Amino acid sequence: MKSTCLVIGGSGFLGRETVPALSERYHVLSTGRREHGPDTLALDLRDADAVARVVHDLRPAAVVALAAYRDPDACEDAPEETRRLNTEPYRVLTRLLAPETPLVFVSTDYVFDGDHPPYHEHDERRPVNVYGESKRDAEDCVASFPGGVIVRVPLLMGWTADPGASGFFSQLIGDLRAREPRLLDDTLARRPTWTRDAARAIARLLCNHERGMFHFSTSRRWTRYQAAVEMAGIMGWPHDHCRPSDAVVPRRARRPRDAQLAMSTWSARGYPPPLEFPGVAREFVRAFAGHPFLIPETGKA
């Protein structure tokens, strides 16, 4: 009989890939804001008593924590609420779980300031926004727990059943579909990484009984403008209405200029690297071939 793995936030963007990646080894139960099926529990992670009941009832053999407020601008506007979801639940979990229980926490490259890349696992963390601060503080909780595993990832790319609601790809295609001129950031470095690869990395770390800190990221540098141009080439669309901006586009939350995650610890284990952005973009286009969202508007191409 398979042991139980609890995936907190399993109904979310990364969770949709993580649950099936873990299902060969574990009986996976996931949590979300609402109950979506027999293997999904409704859980408000901000409710410590509710978290305690779930852990007591399930007694999971492993826990994977994916739920978070991820929009840096929204986090900047609501710092206390951000910490209620992104930090405080991990103080609770590390008190509730048996010390030997693996607790995999997915963190972010935003714990770094972006001024001195690449960053290794134990380099000084200097977040420049509330989101990064909340994840840094959660890391501290998990790092002090014997079963703790911290996986830092950069911007994640993937898709849902609706290509128009698929994060990074939706934004790029929205830029390319636009009829009016677009000024796209050409300064902030991104290293988009596939949710499917990140999910497989989580499964690999659990199955190999790893502990400690790991960086998981692609290596090629892309700005928003460069990614849009690459996407246009893959799709055969024009991009002459898109222009590069050499100034950081002002937003409520400051972003690190280049928070590249060094993969030395991951690579030293002999684990495979993730697929780079162009390869994932081609998979996205193949997955939604013929979908109206991937067909240019009349007069656009």
Image (cartoon, helix red, strand yellow):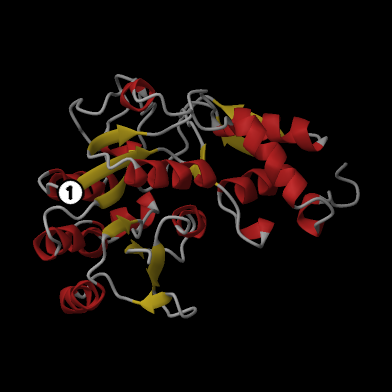
Which of the 4 image quadrants contains residue 280?
top right
Left or right: residue 110 versus residue 36 is: left
Reading the image, the residue beneath label 1 is 147
Left or right: residue 178 versus residue 276 is: right
Q: Looking at the image, is 11 positioned above or below residue 267?
A: below
Q: Is residue 240 visible?
A: no
Quarter of the picture containing the N terminus is bottom left
Q: Identify which residue is drawn at 60% across, 53% down.
A: 159
Q: Looking at the image, is 140 positioned above or below residue 81?
A: above
Measuring from the top left, give residue 26's x and y in whole percent.
39, 60
Measuring from the top left, give residue 289's x and y in whole percent.
81, 50
Q: Identify which residue is drawn at 19% across, 27% down.
A: 122
Name the one closer to the observer, 107 or 221: 107
Q: Looking at the image, is 155 positioned above or below residue 116?
A: below
Q: Secondary structure at mark 1?
A: loop
Name the one closer to the observer, 98 or 251: 98
Q: Looking at the image, is 95 positioned above or below residue 192?
A: below
Amino acid type of disc 1?
Gly
Measuring from the top left, give residue 137's x and y in whole percent.
16, 48
Name the one closer to the observer, 24 or 112: 24
Which of the 4 image quadrants contains residue 60?
bottom left
Q: Identify which residue is drawn at 78% across, 50% down.
A: 294
Seen as rendered, the residue at the extreme front is 1
Q: Residues within 10 Å of mark 1 (few under 14, many from 20)?
A: many
Measuring from the top left, give residue 252's x and y in whole percent.
36, 48
Q: Is residue 213 visible?
A: yes
